[in-house]
Amino acid sequence: MRNKMVMLISLLFLMILVGCNNTDKNETREVSSTFSLPITFGDGTKGEYLLIGEEGKVGFLVGSGKKGEAVEEKIIANKANKYMWHFWGDKDSISGDFKVVGTDSEGKEHPVLVSGNDTVWQYSNTSVSPHNGADSHIPSNMLFPTSGLWKLEIYFNDKLFEEIVINVKDS
C-alpha cells in the first residue's frame, strides 16, 4: 500500500511538472526596443530609419523620417508588408539559410516570411550584403495572422541568432 501511495504521489508530481513545462504560453513578453540609423535621403535631407530589435545585432525597419522626426509604423495583422532586416556580426553568423519562427500570444508557432502567395519558414542561401551601416541586410515580406505580442526567433543555418518581440495591431 505504501509503495502505491509513493508511486501515486510521484506520478502526480511528474504530471504537474510536465503541465508547467510550456513556457511560451506563460512567459512575459516585452516589446523589443527601437533604435535609429542615420541616413541621407535622395534629395540630400538628413533623416533616420527606425528599426525594432537589438541595436548592433539585428533589427528590421519599422519607420523613417527626417532626423528627430521619424515615426514608427504599425505592424498590422493579416496584412503582408515588406520589411528590411539589418544584421551586424561576422559573415558566418549572418548568412546562409535565414529562418524566422513567429510565436503568437497563445504560444503557437507560425511561418511568417512570405514567398509569392505563401508563408514560409525560411529563405535559403542568403548572402552577406552590407547596407545602411549594417554588415548585411535581407529584404523580406512578413504576414502575421493575428494581433498581439509576437516573439520572432531569428535563425541562420538552424542556429538561433536573436529574438525580437513585436506588437501586431488590428487594422
Image (cartoon, grey):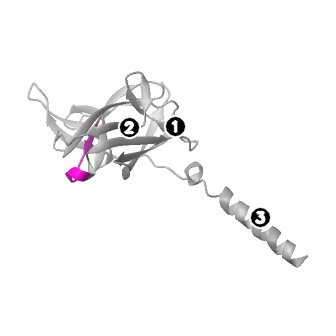
Instruction: Decide whether residue 150 is among the magenta residues.
Output: no
Above or below — where is 119 with respect to 161?
Answer: above
Instruction: Decide whether residue 87 is among the magenta residues.
Output: yes
Quarter of the figure that contains the N terminus? bottom right
Residue at 50% in and 37% down: 110
Above or below — where is 97 with respect to 17?
Answer: above
| Identity, as a three-letter code, of the amino acid under mark 2 | Gln
Calculate the distance from the C-alpha at mark 3 to the C-alpha at mark 2: 40 Å
Q: Is residue 127 left or right of residue 3?
A: left
| Identity, as a three-letter code, of the amino acid under mark 3 | Leu
Q: Residues within 10 Å of mark 2 (few under 14, many from 20)?
A: many
Residue most toward the top? 117
Residue with the mark numbered 3 = 12
| Chain-order first, disc 3 or disc 2 | 3
Does dot 3 land on a helix, a strand or a loop? Answer: helix
Does dot 1 land on a helix, a strand or a loop? Answer: strand
Residue with the mark numbered 2 = 122
| Chain-order first, disc 2 or disc 1 | 2
Evaluate if marks 3 and 2 touch, with contact meaning CB atoms under 8 Å apart: no
Q: Position of residue 104 (x, y in %)?
A: 52, 40
